[in-house]
Image (cartoon, helix red, strand yellow):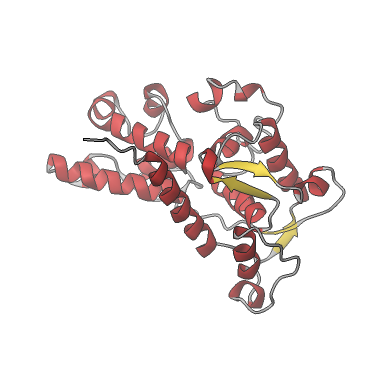
Amino acid sequence: MNSLNHEPQQQVEFHKLHTMAAFAEAQTCRRQVLLHYFDEVASEPCGNCDICLDPPKRYDGTEDAQKVLSCIYRLQQRFGIHQVIDVLRGSKAANVVDRGHDKLTTWGIGADKSTEYWLSVIRQLIHLGLVSQDITRGSSIKLNPAARPVLKAELSLMLAEPRIQLIDVKRKTNPRAPQQYDRKLFARLKLLRRELAEQHDIPPYLVFNDATLAEMSAMLPTSPGEMLAVNGVGQIKLDRFGGEFLDEISDYLTKG
C-alpha cells in the first residue's frame, strides 16, 4: 500500500486559514487586500468597505516598514512571519541563535515593540502588496517591487496603528503576567491545556493557569531551559507537560 505524505497539503491549508484570519483582522481596504491576494494592483482604496468607511487611526509607518523590509532582506527572503518578528525583537530562542540570526544587523531593532505590533505591521505590508508569502516555500516572506521605494526612503508609508491586545497585569492570578502577548498562540495553548486536562482527568488550571500561558505566548520559549524561566513552570510541570507545550510553540513559530 502506498503511503501518502500529507504535509504539503497541510501547509497549504494552514496558509489558507491564516490568510483568512489576516483578512478578517485587516486594517487595510478590503478590496486592496483581495486584489493583492490575486496578484492584482489596487493603488487606491475602494471607499466603500467597512475599513474605508470607518478607517483606523493612521501614523507614519515608514520607519517600521523599513525595519521589517530590511529584516526580510537580511533573512534572504527564506523565512516566515514569526522568524522575522523573532529577529526584530531580539529573541535568543533556538530558532534564532542556531541559525546565526542573532548576528544580523536587524536583530533587536524592534525590541521595543510587541509580537502583535509587528504582526500587524507585516500583515499591512502584505495587504498593501509590498511583500508576499510564498506558499511553495513554507509561507516565507519575499519582497515585491513595491517595497523598493519604501526601503530606499524614496516613499513614505502611512499605516494603521496596530491594535494591541492587553491583559490585566493587576489580576490576582499573577501580578507579573505580561501586558502584551500573542493571542493566537495563547488560544492554541489554551486548547492544548484543555486536551491535556481531559487526558489526565484534572482541572485545566492544574496544567497551567492563564497567566502562565500568556507569559509563554509573550516569551515564546523553545527549549526546556527557556520554559523554566516562565512564571508558573517548575521542574515537575515541565517534565509532565512541558514537551507538549514546547512542541506546540515550535509548530506555531514554524508554520504560523
Give coordinates of residue 45: x percent, y percent. Answer: 71, 71
Q: In the shown orientation, is residue 239 left or right of residue 7? A: left
Residue 72 seen in the current view: yes
Can you name the residue that lies furthest to the front here? 1
**Residue occupying image coordinates x 71% and y 62%:** 41
- The answer to which image quadrant residue 227 occupies is top left
Pick the residue in front: 95 or 112.
95
Please report the residue visible at 55 percent of the width from the left and 49 percent of the height from the top. Answer: 116
Q: How many marks?
A: 0
* 254 w.r.t. 27: above or below: above
Q: Position of residue 110 (x, y in %)?
A: 66, 38
Looking at the picture, how far across and down is residue 18, in whole percent?
47, 53
Q: Quadrant of residue 250?
A: top left
Residue 16 locus on image (x, y percent)? 46, 54
Image-based side of 147 in relation to 29, left or right? right
* Quadrant assignment for the N terminus: top left
Q: Residue furthest right?
A: 154
Residue drawn at 47 percent across, 50 percent down? 15
Looking at the image, residue 38 lies above or below residue 226: below
